[in-house]
């Protein structure tokens, strides 16, 4: 496909929503400035969700031509894009042919917009085209090339998820912004574009007149809002496609462990499925699954996250949407605070799970410092059968786990022997949560401390789960 000449290029409004990501949005605007597209046909609108990091001042100083709309509070991605869309809808219909929705933490390839425009210009039955989303922290890896939704479970099925471009390995995203980015040349069985059910608003180009017909996003605050909008547009008779020739790099959520977003994920997917054809049986099965997930969070000692699942169901059934005031008891702390925890006198014996990657976090350094400073501190490392005890620690103590079917016996034998059990937040072991010890969950961004789970909470969760089989609401 070829881009349009400067005399025929359609007028486009670029809508960016941001909240407290000053550096990211400035880098995005810098990459937008290098687009291979006529600059005089573009208008930029940044919607700021009440940032407190100087975002608006920085944008105004560096990019005075950018129009800024400032919400008085954080309205989430939904409210932010609705602010931008509402402003666009109030303009004369002929002012813009297309609206380009962008996340604030993406970098756009210089051909990203031109390829999307060329696709829509060539295919009148296509109303929405999205870029292939690469991972900003792993620039040669695809996060998604559009996606589909499982109408029975609400799970998103990401197209070509985690496929890599071997020739790009070792290159930064910045270095790839100007290369030939046509993935149909790099991947097997890859067409220039593919029909999907949704493309993320990280980079979504939509016909302005179709956007007006579809209206604003449902009031989800965050998550599934762009999915629902794409499904709505498809039900109007239009196609939604993902381009393999338009690329963006988006900050990956791989290191993030879901906490408060669990509420929005569960509430919103129920509403989405209900509004797009799911029958009562499907919805009730999904509600039972949400109850089951709540029981899991009780089992690993995170009752506040379990409560979010219950509230998601209750608010969905009551028709309560938008932003929710969420307060969690398990606050995360930065890695720098690990050492002070390990030096607490009350913590004398520590057990570290085999799933913890010591080198991926500052935990290894904190443990070494604590063990050198405290001769009384005992640290034991659980290892799996066949694995090597490679941790270089002073006075390291290793416990080799038995095979899986006898592992619970080992858990029982370890009960009451430790003051602190350190687990990976990505792969928590239920058995290790029941050793009558304080829990510390660590991930790539920080850690949180938790008290041991309570049996009565688990029994109540089990009761609610089994009771859900008896209701047909």
Image (cartoon, helix red, strand yellow):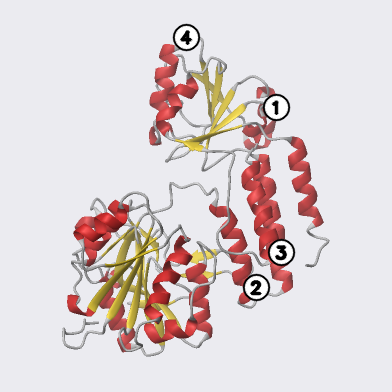
Q: Secondary structure at mark 4?
A: loop
Q: Is residue 8 left or right of residue 188?
A: left
- Residue 299 location in percent, x, y? 68, 40
Quarter of image, res 164: bottom left
Q: Are marks 1 and 2 in contact (CB under 8 Å)?
A: no
State how many labels appear.
4
- The x and y percentages for residue 82 are 45, 71
Res 274 label: 2
Relative to 414, residue 328 above or below? below
Q: Is residue 102 among the parts visible in the rendering?
A: yes
- Front position among marks 1 and 4: 4
Distance between the Cα atoms at labels 1 and 3? 34 Å
**In the displayed structure, does residue 388 sit left or right of residue 37?**
right
If you read the primary sequence from the N terminus, does the residue marked by circle 2 or circle 4 appear first?
2
Which residue bears the numbered disc 3? 285
Give whichever of discs 3 and 2 has the lower sequence position.
2
Using the image as rendered, state which of residue 318 and residue 225 is in the foreground.
318
Q: Nearer the viewer, residue 151 or 74?
A: 74
Q: Residues within 10 Å of mark 2 (few under 14, many from 20)?
A: some
Q: Give the Cα distance between marks 3 and 4.
A: 54 Å
Q: Looking at the image, tell me whether mark 3 or mark 4 is earlier in sequence order.
A: 3
Which comes sooner in the sequence, label 1 or label 4? Answer: 4
The residue carrying mark 1 is 412
* Residue occupying the point 45% across, 58% down: 73
Residue 242: x and y, percent? 39, 74
Q: Toward which corner of the image does residue 280 lie, by quadrant?
A: bottom right
Residue found at the far top of this picture: 375
Q: Which residue is mark 4?
A: 375
Disc 2 secondary structure class: helix
72 is higher (above) or lower (below) than 44: above
**Mark closest to the chain's N terminus, 1 or 3:** 3
Between label 2 and label 4, give the one nearer the viewer. 2
């Amino acid at each position: 496909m070829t881009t349009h000449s400067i005399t025929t290029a359609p007028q486009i409004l670029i809508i960016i929503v941001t909240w407290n990501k000053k550096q990211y949005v400035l880098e995005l605007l810098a990459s937008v400035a290098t687009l291979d597209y006529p600059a005089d046909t573009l208008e930029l609108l940044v919607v700021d969700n009440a940032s407190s990091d100087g975002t608006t001042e920085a944008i105004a100083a560096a990019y005075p031509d950018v129009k800024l709309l400032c919400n008085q509070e954080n309205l989430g991605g939904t409210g932010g894009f609705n602010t931008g869309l509402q402003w666009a809808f109030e303009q004369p219909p002929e002012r813009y042919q297309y609206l380009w929705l962008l996340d604030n933490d993406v970098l756009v390839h210089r051909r990203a917009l031109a390829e999307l425009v060329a696709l829509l210009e060539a295919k009148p039955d296509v109303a929405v085209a999205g870029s292939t989303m690469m991972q900003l922290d792993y620039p040669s890896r695809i996060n998604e090339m559009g996606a589909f939704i499982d109408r029975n479970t609400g799970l998103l099925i990401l197209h070509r998820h985690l496929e890599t471009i071997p020739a790009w390995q070792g290159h930064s995203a910045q270095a790839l912004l100007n290369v030939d980015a046509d993935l149909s040349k790099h991947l097997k069985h890859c067409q220039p574009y593919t029909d999907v059910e949704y493309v993320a608003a990280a980079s979504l180009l939509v016909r302005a007149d179709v956007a007006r017909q579809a209206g604003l996003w449902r009031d989800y605050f965050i998550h599934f809002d762009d999915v629902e909008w794409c499904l709505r547009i498809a039900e109007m008779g239009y196609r939604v496609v993902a381009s393999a020739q338009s690329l963006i790099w988006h900050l990956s959520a791989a290191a993030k462990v879901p906490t408060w977003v669990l509420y929005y994920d569960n509430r919103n997917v129920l509403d989405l499925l209900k509004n797009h054809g799911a029958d009562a049986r499907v919805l009730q099965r999904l509600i039972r699954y949400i109850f089951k997930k709540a029981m899991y969070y009780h089992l690993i000692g995170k009752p506040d996250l379990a409560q979010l699942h219950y509230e998601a169901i209750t608010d969905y059934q009551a028709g309560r949407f938008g932003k929710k005031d969420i307060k969690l008891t398990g606050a995360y702390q930065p890695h720098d605070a690990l050492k002070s925890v390990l030096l607490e006198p009350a913590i004398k014996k520590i057990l570290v799970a085999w799933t913890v990657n010591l080198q991926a976090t500052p935990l290894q350094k904190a443990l070494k410092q604590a063990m050198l400073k405290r001769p009384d501190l005992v640290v034991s490392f659980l290892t799996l059968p066949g694995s090597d005890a490679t941790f270089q620690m002073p006075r390291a103590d290793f416990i080799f786990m038995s095979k899986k079917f006898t592992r619970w016996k080992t858990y029982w034998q370890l009960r009451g022997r430790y003051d602190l059990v350190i687990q990976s937040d990505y792969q928590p072991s239920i058995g290790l949560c029941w050793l009558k010890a304080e829990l510390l969950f660590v991930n790539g961004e920080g850690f949180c401390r938790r008290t041991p789970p309570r049996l009565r909470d688990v029994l109540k969760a089990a009761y609610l789960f089994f009771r859900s089989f008896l209701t047909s609401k």
